[in-house]
Image (cartoon, grey):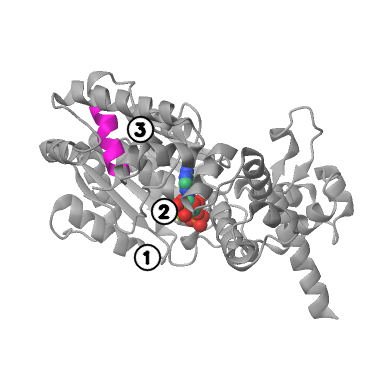
Amino acid sequence: MKGQEAIALIDHLLQSVNKKHKLNDVQSIVFLETWEGHSYQEIADRLLYEHEYIKRVGSLLWQKLSQITGEKVSKQNLQAVLRRYQHSRASDNCTQDWGEAIDVSHFYNRLQELETLETWISDNSTRAIGNFGIGGIGKTSLSVKLAQQVQSQFEFVIWRSLQHSPTLDVILSDILLILIGSEATTNNFISALMEQLRQKRCLLIFDNLESILQGENRGGQYQQGYEDYRQLFARIADEPHQSCIILTGREQPGGFAMRSGENLPVRSLKLCGLSPPVCQQILADKGLKATLLQSRDIVNYFGGNPLAIKLAATTIQTLFGGDIQAFLLQGNTVFSDLWDLFDRQFDRLSPLQQQIMYWIAINQEAATPPKLKTEILPKVSGRQLMEALEALAERSLIEDRRSLNPTASTSLMLQPAIVEYIIERLIQTEISNC
Ligand SMILES: Nc1ncnc2c1ncn2[C@@H]1O[C@H](COP(=O)(O)OP(=O)(O)OP(=O)(O)O)[C@@H](O)[C@H]1O
Ligand SMILES: [Mg+2]
């Protein structure tokens, strides 16, 4: 059993006593670290907490678990007790197929997002949840973590990545095989799936949705040969059933935004960047000890993007001998893997969207929609401009300055790391044109 699975089990145990109980942040970290064999002293050192405090968190947690399980739980027998409990739960009867889901044993925080998502799912009326945003922000990880946490509410949990652009028939025949237990006897896979979603409570997770979308679009159009996914998602969103689908990806498919709303069966969650203390934990996992101030600088620079933070951590280790300050002081932070990540997203933008990104990067302080409209060449209509801005905001590539400071004027901004990337790209284009 992996640490994260064990956490889900403990939450389940705690909730068997009180539905609202679950591990808090510090308890989760102390538990995970203990699970991996670290001493309280090591945990305290890594998290920059007092040893006594960590010890107290640990022993209170074991006491609570002892009360619930009826056996004495300690650091030593933790694994054995939970394994026994897991086996006793096997009768819970949830069939799971995790496909290519990633390991989330070093997933931190996101407690608020998980709580919101759990509430939506427990509500039973939520048929579809979308989680779309910039690459590396943690969409996939969150979807796996969520599915682990809510699995006991479902008869089936099936997680699939669309990264290699499978046709709908391939995906559905595979899913129907799991749900029905034998090959589907019809050619209408969508209707057969809807029948299953009505009969059984299933959680389906489709990740990397952008792989079947066109890019360069404004409405999340599907690639040729993948339009039938639109019909599938529309039917899951619109028809009554007892299941739920979670869609994640860098771009939102057409029709999703129109269907989603706070009190509707289709919901949407936007992931923000992680906070400096969580960034500290990610760096600590990489063996880097950052001060809160340093992690704040890193978070500001990379918009709290966990993938960018991890890539930066690797650079700090390989090129700066672990010296975070030296990394922060030198100017160039976007290269190799991070460059590729931005490249892949930038290349999918339309020429107008790319041009807007260049323009905002150059005119950072004064980048407002009216100014953009008068200055961008060739001239575009107000509608074209607003559509392009909307598409960029949906992909989390641009932000409204007021989201950081409500008193600021309406102006558009890019994360510093993206500005660095765009300017560097501009310079490269100039050089290659010379
Ligand atoms: N809350 C978190 N705590 C620690 N690490 C995290 C967290 N969220 C994400 N990560 C790490 O950041 C990296 C990127 O996360 P993930 O793959 O989930 O992002 P994504 O939004 O799905 O990216 P993409 O758009 O490329 O699919 C992974 O290595 C993941 O382990
Ligand atoms: Mg992903």
Task: Look at label 1 and name its amino acid.
Answer: Pro
Q: In front here: 136 or 282?
A: 282
Question: How would you rate the neighbour count of disc 2 (Cα within 10 Å): few for under 14, some for 14-19, many for 20 or more?
Answer: many
Under tag 2, what secondary structure? strand
Disc 1/disc 3 C-alpha distance (Å): 27 Å
Q: Name the residue under label 3.
A: 121
Q: Is residue 133 left or right of residue 69?
A: right
Q: Is mark 3 on a helix, strand or loop?
A: helix
Q: Is mark 2 within 8 Å of ligand 2?
A: yes
**Distance (Cα) linking label 1 and label 2:** 12 Å
Which residue position holds label 2? 207
Q: Is the magenta stretch mostly helix, strand or loop?
A: helix
Q: In which quarter of the image is residue 153?
A: top left
> Residue at left 54%, top 55%?
310
Count of labels in the image: 3
Q: Is residue 85 visible?
A: yes
Q: What segment is highlighted magenta in the picture?
A: 4-13
- Pick whichever, 410 or 65, lies toward us: 65
**Residue 216 image offset from top left, x and y in percent:** 62, 61
Between 179 and 31, the one nearer to me in the picture: 31
The quadrant of the picture occupied by the C terminus is: bottom right
Q: In this view, does 286 lie above or below 226?
A: above
Above or below residue 190? Residue 151 is above
Q: Tell me if mark 1 has few (under 14), some (14-19) or many (20+) residues whose alpha carbon lies within 10 angstroms of its own.
A: some
| Residue 395 rendering spot, x and y as whole percentages | 60, 50
Which residue was labeled with disc 1?
166
Sequence-wise first label, 1 or 3: 3
- Of pointers 1 and 2, the one earlier in the residue sequence: 1
Q: Which amino acid does label 3 sit on?
A: Ile
As drawn, 20 above or below 375:
above
Between circles 1 and 3, the one closer to the viewer is 3
